[in-house]
Amino acid sequence: MSTHNTTPPNAAPRSRLAPGDIGPLVERLRKGERRAIAQVITELERLSSAAPDLLKALQPHLGHALVAGFTGPPGAGKSTLVNAVIDHLRRQGRTVGVIAVDPSSPISGGAILGDRIRMTAALDDDGVFVRSLASRGYLGGLSPAAVRIIDAMDGAGFDIILLETVGTGQNEIDVAEVADIRIVISAPGLGDDIQAMKSGLLEIADIMVVNKGDRPGAEQTMQQLLGALSIRATMSGKVPVLKTSAISGEGVPKLVDTIDAIGKTVGARGAMDRRRRRARYLIARAAADLVAARIKAGGAGGLEPLADAVLSGTMSPDEAARSVLRDAD
């Protein structure tokens, strides 16, 4: 049974795919047909009525691709660096899937496509497939659709999948649950952001990168990161700190080599363990969404009686929360 087949709180959008279309569509995706890849991703992103069957059909073909997540504060040059990494990977002959999480449009809720515009290495290259994905307001920087799209790209046979988060700051840690390798990017002049990262992004990093390394202050930023890592005994000496310049390409080969080296260790854990972690993320996110929907709807009988009970001291906030959870069953 697919671990992704969860029932959303609202009815799934209808799909134009008939049950007999699922198998042939997945076969076309497996052959690398771009139109088929795009169609499957669209169905999975909207979690249409065909999505559970598509995910089930993909299951036997998953576990091949390594997922590398790129995150970090705004202004660090994540998209430009990802573009340089794509170019280097393609020179090595590897195929690349890219999920670029953009801010959501306040009107349509869709992605604002800024990252895809900047990824020039992917233009007119059949070995690269880029999909922009809206964050949908999730504070962790990702929406659950990212995991489903990873499955589509994995099933399509891409060697590596690059996941770039929206870049909202230290809350953006969902990538730790979704990516096999987490690359946290900073840049000179973001000293305050490095301080904030100590309680967020810094703790999830497998690789730290100081991008825009040709700018003044790059060495100082590297020392700040090394110092921040040194105060965490479990991280000191284990997290490499690299310097790159996405524009010139300096440091990018070493970054890719480091991703590959860590990828070998990750691969030794087995594909099922990596996929199980993503499944746990989906379950936790679905549970949180159900509870949030219940609270937004006011719960059974509304939240007002619970609020009055908390104010009167006859019920603690924890007891009120448990009451809401019971009503959500």
Image (cartoon, grey):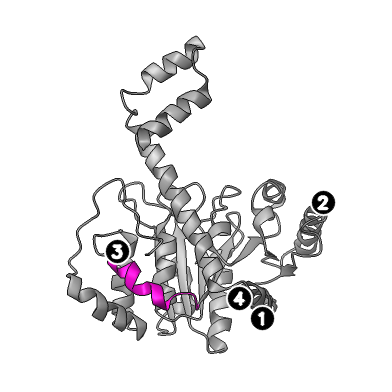
Identify the residue at image location x=69%, y=54%: 202
Q: Which numbered disc, 4 or 3, marks the residue that appears first in the sequence?
A: 3
Q: Residues within 10 Å of mark 1 (few under 14, many from 20)?
A: some
The residue that label 3 is drawn on is 51
Q: Label 4 to label 3, Cα distance in Å?
A: 28 Å
Q: Label 1 to label 4, Cα distance in Å?
A: 20 Å
Q: Amino acid at mark 3?
A: Ala
Residue 43, disc = none
Whether residues under marks 2 and 4 lie with C-beta atoms below 8 angstroms apart, the answer is: no
- Image x and y of residue 282, in percent: 45, 55
Residue 231, disc = 2
Whether residues under marks 3 and 1 lie with C-beta atoms below 8 angstroms apart, the answer is: no
Element marked by disc 4: helix
Whether residues under marks 1 and 2 lie with C-beta atoms below 8 angstroms apart, the answer is: no
User: Which label sits in the foreground, 1 or 4?
Assistant: 4
Q: Residues within 10 Å of mark 3 (few under 14, many from 20)?
A: many
Q: What is the quadrant of the N terminus in the image?
A: bottom left
- Image x and y of residue 24, in percent: 24, 81
The residue that label 1 is drawn on is 253
Question: What range is drawn magenta here?
Answer: 53-64
Which of the 4 quarters of the picture holds residue 37? bottom left
Identify the residue at image location x=30%, y=45%: 9
